[in-house]
Amino acid sequence: MRFRTGVKAMLLGVSLVGGLTASAQYSAPATPAPYNPIALAEVTGAPRTAVQAGQKNYQTLSQNPYLGGVPSGKLSAAPVDLSLEDAVTLGLRQNLGGVLATDAVIDARGEEWQALSDLLPNVVTDTGFGVHQINVKAAFGITIPKEPPIIGPFGYFDSRAYLTQSVFDWTFIERARSSQAQLKSAEFSSRDARELVVLVIVSNYLLAIADQSEVESATSQRDTAKALFQQASDQKTAGLASAVDVLRSQVQLQSREQKLITAQNQLAKQKLVLARAMGLPLGQQFRITTQVPYQELTPSSLDEAIQNACKTRADFQSQVNRVRSAELARKAASAERYPTLGAETDYGLSGVNPGSSHGTVDAAATLHIPIFQGGRVHGDVLRADASLTEERQRLEDLRARIDQEVRDAYLDLEAAAQEVSVEKSAVNLATETLEQSRDRFSSGVTDNIEVVQAQDALAIANDAYIASLYSYNSAKISLARATGVAESRYSEYLGEK
């Protein structure tokens, strides 16, 4: 089908590259890619060409978390109605990419607590009871007159609480601040993952709608071919048509039946792709209930959209916080040269047994002044500088990518709108041509070659119109993603019914 091999070229480039990293550990920066023909086919699971249909890289597809989901819920024996809103809601809750991004936030929060633990008091307790025997001469090199050289065995009991507190350590302070920036970055990455989930779910839902339209079109073409076959048979019986006209009509009917079978199979497979991305129960059948007809979208100006994109895009804000975290990590590395001040104290009970124990306490303040550390601090600073430079470069690259994605989305939207207008006109012309050809054949003016050709032309025009409509709706959701409002405004952009 034409729209499955060429039209899907524009939507989900960010999902394959940026989506994979967005759902990974928060410490691995997400690197969105511009929209491209290969990525959409890989994310939707559709082959780019018929030749490549059997040559898809299954490993790449299976490793993309946004193509998967965590199945949940009870399997219903009857098919369920599934609107676009329902599909997006399920995807946001159960899509694997979104789930992994949420887990990354939890991991970042755990690392923040680990960094904070260096600044908070640490209290531990030890309790021990043992038996000792001491050789005085061997241990101390002395002999006590009138006392045996061996003392014991005697019992010993000690129960003690130890408190350590960092009073001033600038390295720990900067590391804690860096971990807080990492947590914010992970939270923005999780929001960006939700945008990608919406993009994937809506794209696959639109593709299912297009496949369903293909089935309806193929059914109509099959019915028309059946009527033409019956017409040719009747005219042959009446002596107004030849046997070759009947044979030609029969071949055309079989061709349309084959196309219908292919369209039905493609729709069933696309529903499987959508069901997996949403996390539906395994084997759950459903019906597509949302229709997304052509509705013109008038976006804001290009310059305004580019300016707002960096403010609303969660992946950009995530990268800004990565830069901030790298800056603080660099300060933490430099602070390893600074003196540190700490406090240590312990209090406990000691004695030969718990009943005869006495309280003891120790307290000390420690000042640690690094003098020479063998170049370790210099090495840490160099690595922190390299990491900071890398994050800043990624930020500027992402800024340029967002600019490109917004511009691409505007170009695609304009081109797709023009294509819809052209293809709709082509369908009207092809329909009129077929009607005139059938009238000519009925009147005996011509044979049914002209009718068959007109029917083929109408089939091609219908396929092209379905493809253009899918392309336009895909361009709209692409624009919503490019400007960072896919989750909040996808319904408004599509104008669903």
Image: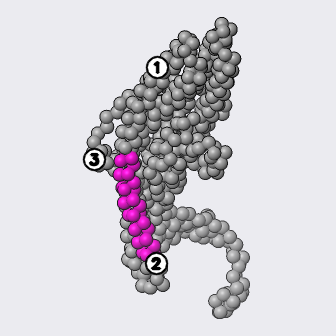
Where does the magenta region start and end? 380-408
Q: Secondary structure at mark 3?
A: helix
* Quadrant of the drawing holding the N terminus: top right
Please tell me which residue is depicted at 72% across the width and 76% down the height of the picture. 153
Please tell me which residue is depicted at 68% across the width and 8% down the height of the picture. 237
Please determine whether, in this image, residue 222 is positioned above or below residue 369.
Answer: above
- Tag count: 3
Three-letter residue code for mark 3: Asp
Q: Which residue is mark 1?
A: 432
- Residue 452 position by quadrant: top right
Q: Report if the CB atoms under discs 1 and 2 are less than 8 Å apart.
A: no
- Main SS of residues in magenta: helix
Spatial separation of the CA atoms under disc 1 and disc 2: 77 Å
Q: Secondary structure at mark 2?
A: helix
Q: Earlier in the sequence, mark 2 or mark 3?
A: 3
Please determine whether, in this image, residue 173 is positioned above or below residue 294.
Answer: below
Q: Which residue is mark 3?
A: 303
Three-letter residue code for mark 2: Gly
Q: Residues within 10 Å of mark 3 (few under 14, many from 20)?
A: few
Q: Secondary structure at mark 1?
A: helix
Label for residue 379?
2
Spatial separation of the CA atoms under disc 2 and disc 3: 44 Å
Residue 106 visible to an observer of this rendering? no
- Residue 391 position by quadrant: bottom left
